[in-house]
Image (cartoon, rainbow, N blue to C red):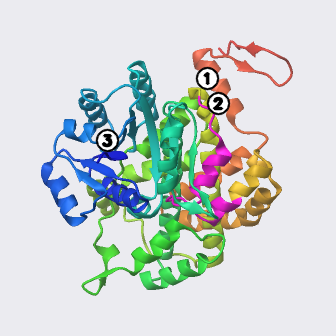
C-alpha cells in the first residue's frame, strides 16, 4: 500500500497531526531521524493507515505521487538539511510542506529553489498547539498556487471549524503563509503579556483561587478567549497541595517569532509597540539574577498605596487586547513591502477557530473589518475605545504609582494616544536632526524640504 501523505518528524506536533490525518481517513507514512521514536510511535498507535519507515528512501517511495511530504521539525537549518536529504529521492511535481515556525524569508528562498527543480513547496503556518494538531488547527497556507489543489483537501480535513467554516486559507506564493503566522505570533505575545500584567496587579490583592474566579466571570463576555480560559486552568493547577504557578520560575523564554514580528515592524515602518514591549518583557524576565540583585539594592516595592478597581482592570484588559490585535492588522497591511498581498479579513476569519489567539474580541474585530477596513474609524471600535480609555489610563496610573511594571498596557495606551493626536513633539525631534545632522525638515506653510543654519 502506498500512503496518501508522508510525515517527516515525530515530535509532539508530528505525532498528533498524524493521528488527526488517519482519523480523517488518510493513510500516512512516517519517518523520524531516530528509529526508536518511529518504533515507539507505531507500537503505541498501531493502525493499518500508518506505515512506519526507517530510512529516507523507503519513506519517500512509500508515498503516492505526486508525493505530499509534511516536515514537522525545528525551524532553520534542520529544514534545509531535511530538504537536501529528500532531494535524493523525490521527483518532479512532488510537494514538500514545511509546517514548522519558519521565517517567511526562508520559505521564499526554499519556494524558489524547489520551483527551479520542478518541485512544489508550501510554508504552512499552523496555530492551535498540541490540542489543535489533534483536533483541528488554524492553518495559514503559502506556496505554489498551481499545486494548492493537490493539498487543499488534506488541509481542510485537519483544520478547525468555526461556525461550520474550516479555518484555513491560502495567502499567496512563497512565504506568505509563514508571514501571516509570524504576525499571529506577535499578537499572541502581546495578548499573553496583557493578561499576565493584569494578573500581576491582581496578585497584589488576591490569591490565585480568587483571581481565577475573577477571570472566570470576565471570561463569560467580550473577554472570552482561549488564553483567558488557559490562564484560569493554570491558576487552579496544584502540585502536592500547592499552586503549581508558585513553583514556576518567572523567566519567560521565546523561540523567535515574536522578535521576527518586531523586525517586520522595523523594516516596514509600521509601529507595533505592544508586540515589541511583550518581546522585551520576556528579555528582561530572563535577567533574573540581575533583577534579584537590583530589587534588593533599590527596595522600591513597599506597601500598595491605593485600592484596585476591578472594573478598571477588566476594561483595561479589553482595550489592551483590542489594540494588540489592531497593531497586528496594521502589520499584515505591511505585507505589500514583501510583495505579498495578504487578505486580512481571511486571516482574521481563520484565527477565530483553533488558533491560540481566538476569542470574542477577535470575532468582533472580524465583523467590523468586513464593514470598514479602516478599523480605527469603525464606529463600534471607536465606541469601545472611548468607553474603556479612562480605565486603561487609571490602571496605568495605579501601576506606576506603586512601581508595578505593565509594559504592554503602557505601550498600548501611548500607542493609542499618539495615533489619535493631531500634533506630536516630532517637530522638535526633526529640528534636532537638522541641527546636528543637516537632515532637513518639512514646513507647514510651504512645500519642500528645508535646512536651517542653526549656528
Decide: marks 2, 3 in contact (CB < 8 A)? no
Residue 342 in magenta stretch: yes
Q: Nearer the viewer, residue 334 or 212?
A: 334
Range of magenta residues? 340-364
Left or right of 329, for residue 5: left
Q: Which disc number belongs to residue 255?
A: none
Tell me the CA gap for discs 2 and 3: 61 Å
Sequence-first tag of 2 and 3? 3
Q: Which residue is mark 3?
A: 63
Residue sitting farthest toward the front? 1
Residue 286 in magenta stretch: no
Residue sitting farthest toward the bottom? 241
Task: Look at the picture and state if 440 lies above or below 411.
Answer: above
Q: From this viewpoint, is residue 162 visible?
A: yes
Taking the spot 48% from the left edge, 40% from the top edge, the residue there is 178
Left or right of 401, for residue 256: left
Residue 119 in the image: state x and y as whole percent.
40, 26
- Mark 1 secondary-structure assignment: helix
Where does the C terminus fall, quadrant-wise?
Answer: top right
Task: Look at the picture and state if 39 lies above or below 419.
Answer: below
Taking the spot 40% from the left edge, 74% from the top edge, the residue there is 234
- Mark 2 secondary-structure assignment: helix
Residue 307 location, quadrant: bottom right
Amino acid at each position: 500500500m502506498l500512503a496518501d501523505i508522508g510525515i517527516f518528524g515525530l515530535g509532539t506536533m508530528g505525532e498528533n497531526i498524524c493521528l488527526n490525518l488517519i482519523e480523517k481517513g488518510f493513510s500516512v507514512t512516517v519517518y523520524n531521524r531516530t528509529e526508536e521514536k518511529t518504533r515507539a510511535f507505531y507500537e503505541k498507535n498501531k493502525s493499518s493507515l500508518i506505515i512506519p519507515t526507517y530510512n529516507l528512501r523507503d519513506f519517500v517511495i512509500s508515498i503516492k505521487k505526486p508525493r505530499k511530504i509534511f516536515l514537522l521539525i525545528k525551524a532553520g537549518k534542520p529544514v534545509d538539511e531535511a530538504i537536501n536529504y529528500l532531494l535524493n529521492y523525490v521527483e518532479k511535481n512532488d510537494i514538500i510542506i514545511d509546517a514548522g515556525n519558519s521565517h517567511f524569508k526562508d520559505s521564499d528562498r526554499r519556494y524558489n529553489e524547489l520551483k527551479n527543480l520542478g518541485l512544489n513547496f508550501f510554508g504552512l503556518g499552523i496555530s492551535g498547539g498540541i490540542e489543535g494538531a489533534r483536533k483541528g488547527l488554524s492553518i495559514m497556507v503559502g506556496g505554489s498556487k498551481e499545486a494548492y489543489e493537490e493539498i487543499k483537501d488534506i488541509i481542510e480535513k485537519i483544520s478547525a471549524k468555526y461556525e461550520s467554516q474550516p479555518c484555513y486559507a491560502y495567502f499567496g506564493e512563497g512565504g506568505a503563509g509563514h508571514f501571516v503566522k509570524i504576525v499571529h505570533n506577535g499578537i499572541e505575545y502581546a495578548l499573553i503579556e496583557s493578561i499576565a500584567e493584569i494578573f500581576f496587579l491582581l496578585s497584589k490583592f488576591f490569591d490565585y483561587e480568587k483571581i481565577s474566579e475573577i477571570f472566570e466571570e470576565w471570561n463569560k463576555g467580550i473577554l472570552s478567549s482561549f488564553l483567558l480560559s488557559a490562564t484560569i486552568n493554570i491558576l487552579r493547577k496544584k502540585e502536592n497541595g500547592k499552586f503549581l504557578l508558585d513553583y514556576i520560575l518567572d523567566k519567560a523564554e521565546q523561540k523567535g517569532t515574536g522578535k521576527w514580528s518586531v523586525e517586520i515592524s522595523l523594516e516596514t515602518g509600521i509601529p507595533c509597540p505592544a508586540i515589541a514591549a511583550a518581546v522585551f518583557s520576556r528579555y528582561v524576565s530572563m535577567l533574573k539574577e540581575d533583577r534579584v540583585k537590583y530589587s534588593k539594592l533599590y527596595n522600591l516595592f513597599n506597601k500598595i498605596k491605593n485600592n484596585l478597581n476591578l472594573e478598571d482592570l477588566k476594561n483595561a484588559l479589553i482595550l489592551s487586547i483590542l489594540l494588540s490585535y489592531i497593531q497586528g492588522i496594521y502589520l499584515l497591511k505591511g505585507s505589500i513591502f514583501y510583495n505579498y498581498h495578504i487578505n486580512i479579513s481571511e486571516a482574521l476569519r481563520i484565527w477565530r477557530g483553533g488558533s491560540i489567539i481566538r476569542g470574542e474580541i477577535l470575532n468582533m474585530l472580524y465583523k467590523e473589518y468586513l464593514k470598514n477596513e479602516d478599523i480605527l474609524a469603525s464606529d463600534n471600535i471607536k465606541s469601545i475605545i472611548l468607553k474603556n480609555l479612562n480605565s486603561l489610563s487609571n490602571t496605568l496610573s495605579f501601576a506606576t504609582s506603586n512601581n508595578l511594571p505593565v509594559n504592554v498596557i503602557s505601550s498600548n495606551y501611548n500607542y493609542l494616544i499618539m495615533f489619535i493626536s493631531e500634533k506630536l513633539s516630532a517637530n522638535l525631534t526633526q529640528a534636532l536632526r537638522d541641527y546636528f545632522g543637516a537632515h532637513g525638515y518639512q514646513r507647514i506653510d510651504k512645500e519642500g524640504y528645508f535646512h536651517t543654519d542653526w549656528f
